[in-house]
Amino acid sequence: MSTENTFHRVLYIDLNKNSFEVKNREELFKKHIGGTGVAIRLLHEECPEGVDPLAPEAPIILAIGPLTGIFPLASKTVAMFKSPLTGNLGESHVGGRSAVAIRMAGYGAIVIKGKSKQPIYLSIHDNKVFFKDATTIWQMSSSFTAGRIIRQKEGNSGMRSIMRIGQAGENMVSYAAVTTETYRHFGRLGLGAVFGSKLLKGINISGKSSVDVADSKSFRKLYKKIYDDAVEQPLMKKYHDLGTAGNVLTLNELDSLPTKNLRHSRLEGVENISGENLAKNFLGRRVACAHCPVGCIHLAALREPSEHEEHFYKTTMVGYDFELIYALGSMLGISKPESMLKLIDQVEKYGTDAMSTGVVMAWATEMMQKKKISTEHTDGLALKWGDGETYIKMVKKIVLQENDFYKALAKGVEYAADIYGGKEFAMSFGKNEMAGYHTGPAGYLGFLLGARHSHLDNAGYSIDQTDMINVPLTPPQVVDKLIKEEGLRQLLSSLTVCFFSRGIYKLDIIRQSLQTAGYNFTEEELTKLGQDIYYDKYKFKFREGFKFEDLHVPKRIYETPDLTGLITPEFIKEGLEYAKSKII
Amino acid sequence: MKLSIIDADRCVGCQSCMFACSRRTGKAGLTNSSIMIKSKGGIETGFIIIVCSSCSNPPCARVCPTGALVANPTGGVKLDPDKCNGCGFCREACIIDAVHWDTDNEKPEICVQCGYCVPFCPHGVIELVK
């Protein structure tokens, strides 16, 4: 092995002073692996208690895993921060080229603190950090253009990742995203707003280094096994074929697809926005994250005729997957694929989180239907289910926040409902807007207990689909299952392997691949480590004031038919009470 | 035998071939990779594959001042690392940028047409042909 494993290096950047330093934190990585495990430790170290999430002192932590650059599918970067949306733990994962680029630049984690004097973007190449003026691309209406400009200005194409925010981040919309490689996102929980609060437009990072492994021969053998599984397992083929969009019809069929602000769980005309129809009539290209042979990123080619001139078309590439189809399709009653794709493109352009944006607009639509708000609130927009053009205008208004109503919407649905009412149908859990699974009680308990408030925390929705429809579990049994699964997922996100590959990276393979990377753990140790990381995240949540009693559950979930028929206030209450006794 | 690009439009940009090429040397990472995948201009535009095209009278070998690079009769070029002084003339001479660079040793990395990357392309973009 070479003298220093560059993976153990943490790059600390101070935007107050435009300075940086690198520290070797071998002890941290050896104990907490990487990704989520390391990031939560760094957040404990760096985030002052009770800090305003948008204050200069609030840190941005980025961390990758020990398998990144060595094995396929370890292509995620974990971000940790204090969420401006929930006021508590913020965690978000992104793929694209980010993780490989950070590893090749020679770092395992990056910590960013402070606030720049003027808009900047960071350019990190190997051992150098450049602080580049971003004044000219700040407040540019399209994040696509800003991304392209950084791309053209900076070298190392193919070896780099470009993270950037749009106007939503600059204007500190509480659920603004950070976009990488145009179509991948640190979504959910508002990392984009944290970037914006620091006047940080983006990060361009690149490098090209080699990584020593413990034993070349066994490395090649294990690599081949993982690679073959990734391209041959039927589940992985599904991700490549229709992608997650393949779930649209399935969930609709199961009464589980949130529709029109979850007044319904099925959408009329759903086949038009199904993965099948999008693949047949719109799919223009499939692409992959760096070092992942699956290629699950689906880009639709949207061809639109000009209103002004015959035979004049513009073609836009629009990324889609299940969550976008739910949030910007069914949740808003949109079943026309062109309308949905145009709306997705608008959200992408401004850089908000798609799920939160869809849920916020769905709530506002119902508020207008119930005459609790009027066009005076919406600055003239008459909101109607299925009316994509109006929602496109609305996205811009949310981002620009020109009146009090839009200012409230920019802080999330729970915040807006606290002011304007309609909380019983404000579809958020732990102040984070819901994901697209109205599958049953396990799904909702999963949303409520997930340590990073993501639908991918524990897959409660799959417990609904496998257990609850057959032999229903009791609330404590569900919670035990959720917590156990969370532990395993903390392990995966500490390795920063994609959750899609959880069927490949089983404990034995994790143990072997870590050995190749120079870490010796037993399977028991790994299981315990996952659970410890889960509790370490809760430790941060409790420190920042999280209380189970504060969790708001919108009544709507009990009213709309679901797959299991078991969503009751009693079930959720008992589940939460049991969780409270388990998570201390 | 030489490495040939069958259909660049099938490339999804996963870079598995790049990592395979590095792994050929026993290492992970990318320093020792002599094939490069990058987007034409944003991933929505598709990808280009930059690898030695095995010219019959290779300019990289012609400009080598130390005789470290010589044309290989079976295709591609051969590097004698002991003779190479790391001047980088070969890099300048290759107009398709297929002379990659090993930053650890400051020497060129040029495809040896071994085909190790081929089975690691999930979509049959590259092939070893006679």
Image (cartoon, coloured by chain):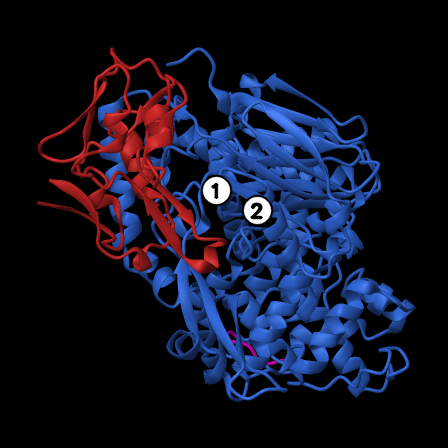
| Image: A227 above or below A222 | below
Front residue (pair A105, B7): B7
Q: Which residue is drawn at 70% across and 41% down?
A: A81
The quadrant holding residue A533 is top right
Q: Where is residue A94 in the image (x, y as percent from the top left)?
A: 55, 48
Q: Name the residue under label 1.
A: A157
Chain A color in figure: blue
Q: Is residue A183 visible?
A: yes
Amino acid of disc 2: Arg
Q: Where is residue B98 in the image (x, y as percent from the top left)?
A: 32, 37
Q: Is residue A354 visible?
A: no
Say which chain is red. B
On the picture, is B6 further left or further right than B90? left
| Image: A460 above or below A92 | below
* Mark positioned earlier in the residue sequence (2 or 1): 2
| Image: A337 above or below A450 | below
Which chain hosts label 1?
A: A
Front residue (pair A446, A122): A122
Q: Residue A170 carries which label?
A: none
Assess whether residue A518 is covered by the magenta stretch: no
The magenta region covers: A560-564
Which chain hosts label 2?
A: A
Q: Which residue is drawn at 88% across and 67% down?
A: A402
Q: Name the residue under label 2.
A: A151
